[in-house]
Every structure is written in C-alpha cells, then in structure tokens.
Amino acid sequence: MPAAAAAKTRRIGLVSDTHGVFHPALEPVLKGVEEILHAGDVGLPEVIERLSRIAPVTAVSGNVDVAVKGLSYPAFARRDFYGLRILITHYVGTPEQPMPPVAEAIKTEKPGMVLSGHTHKPSVESAGGILYVNPGSCGPRRFKLPISCGVLNLRPQEGSAAPQAEVVLFDLETGKELIWTGG
C-alpha cells in the first residue's frame, strides 16, 4: 500500500478575528485538530494561550494586533500538509484581485490554499486554482454576521492533499453548530 494511502486524514483548525475573546464553542469544535491556524486580529495573547492548550498554533498579525503588547506575529505565514501549501494572512482583498503584497506572496509561495480573515464574513471559494478560506469571526459578534470558525480536513492523495474546508457557524440562540461548506 502506498505511503499516501496509509496516511490518515488530518484535521486543521481555522480561526480568525477573535478580537481578544476565546469563544466557548471553540474548544469542542477544535477538539482533536492537530494544529490551529489563526488568520489575525488575535486581540490578546491569552487567546493564543488558550488555543495552544488544544493544539499548536500558527498565527499572523491583523490590523488590531499591531498596538497590542505581547502580540508580535508576521504578516504572512506558511504551513505545508501532505504537499498542500497554505498561505496565511489577515486580509487578501478578493480572490480574483488580491492586494499587491498578497499577490506577490501568492506568486512566491505558490499555495494551494490561502487562509484569511478581516471581513468577519465566512467564505470558501476557489479562484485561479487556489482555495480561499475565510473562517469568519469567532470573537464578538459584529455586523450581524455569524460567529464562526473552520476545520480543514486533508485527505492524502498521490503527490498532495485534497483539501476540504468547512466553516462551523454557531447558532447563538440554540448553541448548536451548523456546518457550511461555501456557496
């Protein structure tokens, strides 16, 4: 049996725009992930500390993080899983027309997926052969948008991984989780 076929599905937690809040729904949703990727606007170092109790965290800085003592993350980070390169940044612009620094990072890094935040609006879409995922915001509710995070399921296939991103929306009235895969 080829090594890729014997490898297990990997679950990666996707978080953004916590704005200093560790939402209680994060722990059960992210339980069992092997790593958490935070796309900026962390807000307070305690959020990363709490997330780190679940799994190791890779984070980037968002616009609200620049003035927060104890937060010093890069504007871009990169993670590779099963041959899938993920570029993490806080704000992309749009997948069809990324902001110049993001477009340059995409050209240099050649990711299969770009993880971002900033808009607080969850989205999963493809453009130019790249999967763009914004897990939305799991901090204070803003703009009447849902509270959400994401889970990336990576199944190995020959030469790389087949990414399947899900955004988990939290129904604040019932406490239930709703899975949304874009569209």
Image: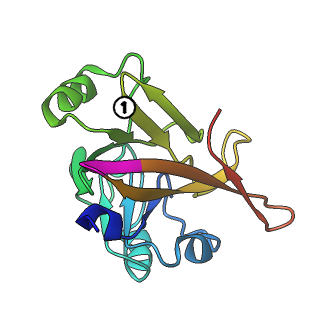
Residue 86 sits above or below residue 43 on the image: above
163 sits to left or right of 140: left
Task: Please tell me which residue is depicted at 31% across the width and 22% down the height of the picture.
Answer: 99
Where in the figure is residue 101, as x and y percent of width and height?
A: 22, 26
Residue 19 sits above or below residue 111 on the image: below
Q: Please tell me whether residue 182 belongs to the stretch shown in magenta.
A: no
Where in the figure is residue 88, as x and y percent of width and height?
A: 31, 46
Q: Please tell me whether residue 159 belongs to the stretch shown in magenta.
A: yes
Residue placed furthest toward the bottom: 53
Q: Quadrant of the C terminus?
A: top right
Kindly identify which residue carries mark 1. Answer: 130
Task: Please tell me which residue is depicted at 49% across the width and 51% down the height of the picture.
Answer: 17
Our reading of the magenta stretch's main secondary structure is strand
Viewer-closest of 124 and 49 = 124
- How packed mark 1 is, by other alpha carbons closer than 10 Å (few <14, some 14-19, many 20 or more), is some
Looking at the rendered structure, the secondary structure element under dot 1 is strand
Residue placed furthest toward the front: 1
Confirm whether residue 117 shows in the render.
yes
Q: How many marks?
A: 1
39 sits to left or right of 72: right
88 sits to left or right of 183: left
Task: Please tell me which residue is depicted at 27% across the width and 57% down the height of the picture.
Answer: 82
Confirm whether residue 61 shows in the render.
no
